[in-house]
Image (spheres, rainbow, N blue to C red):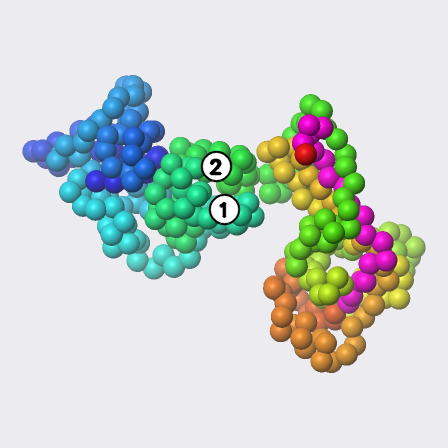
Amino acid sequence: MRAHLGDQLVIENAATGAARRDGEIIGLRHDDGTPPYEVRWSDTGEVTLMFPGPDAHIRHPAHEQQEPAGQAGPAATAATRPAGATGPGDIGRRIAVERRRRGLSRVETARRARMAPDYLAYLEERPGDPTLATLIRLADAFGTTVAALRGGGMELAPGQGHALLHPELRDLGKEECRTRLSTHGVGRVAVSAPDGHPEVVPVNYEIVQDTIVFRTASQSVVAKAAGTTVAFEVDHVDEALSRGWSVLAVGTATVVTDPEVVHDLGRNAHTTPWAGGERDMWMSIRPTRLTGRRIALAADE
């Protein structure tokens, strides 16, 4: 028998097979998920240390499977995955993205969250609905919140939390700015529109030899800014720790016209524009000024 935090331990009536008692597993004594377990019983709310007998089985709410007391964990998990479940759900995708963003392996994440790596792989790769206890452990492992893993606040502007007690605003050097720009992502282009008003447009961008490139529609406000000086900004906000950084690049917006270069850009792009539609005009910005700042604790190195 193997279990994960947040699973349910169900004890059946030997005569009828009906559930006689059940509770949530809130504590593991062994990393491989074998008994004993700390169980919070649903009928009393009490927590006890439990050594399951032959009348007990584990229920995994995340994928609605049951594991009899004498059945091995990982093999049973693979054998009983729901038919037709071929891709991750929203929570699974957020867990995977958060793990990669923090540079953590599945093994290390599972160790921090006190769960089996196979179960973490299941959550990332299959549609599921992890229990609150599982999400709490994962949020703690990532240093974020359960609400963030669930996608809470997606329709709200970032940065709703309180400021740090002793924040410090620090300048970033050019190399660190280039590092934070990375190879691709989503940034914002600030231009002066034909009517004279400023506009800011989010775009999916790539970095090619220190040049910012992105696709846009030929009649877009950004396309009409070709030949003018524009600003390009990327940032990241850490909601859990009230920290963040931003990088600002300034340069001339240029339309990429060389057919061979356009072909190579399209072939090597990491993603297509999220906004969709006909966005086949490539533009470039070679920064003439690159600056950045970050918010951190005054005591941080």
Per the image, the residue denoted by label 2 is 141
Q: Is residue 196 above or below residue 136?
A: below
Q: Amino acid at mark 1?
A: Leu
Q: Name the image quarter holding the N terminus.
A: top left
Q: Name the image quarter holding the C terminus.
A: top right
Tell me if I can see residue 211 in this picture. yes
Q: Is residue 112 above or below residue 38?
A: below
Q: Secondary structure at mark 2?
A: helix
Q: What's the mark number on residue 53?
A: none
Q: Disc 1 versus disc 2: distance between alpha carbons?
A: 10 Å
Q: Position of residue 94 (x, y in %)?
A: 51, 47
Callout 1: 10 Å neighbours few (<14), some, many (20+)?
some
| Picture residue at 27% right of the left edge, 49% below the top | 74
Q: Secondary structure at mark 1?
A: loop
Q: Amino acid at mark 2?
A: Ala
Let me know if residue 3 is in the magenta part.
Answer: no
Magenta-drawn segment: 283-300
Q: Quadrant of residue 284?
A: bottom right
Callout 2: 10 Å neighbours few (<14), some, many (20+)?
some
Q: Quadrant of residue 268?
A: bottom right
| Picture residue at 46% right of the left edge, 48% below the top | 105
Q: Quadrant of residue 69?
A: top left
Per the image, the residue denoted by label 1 is 104
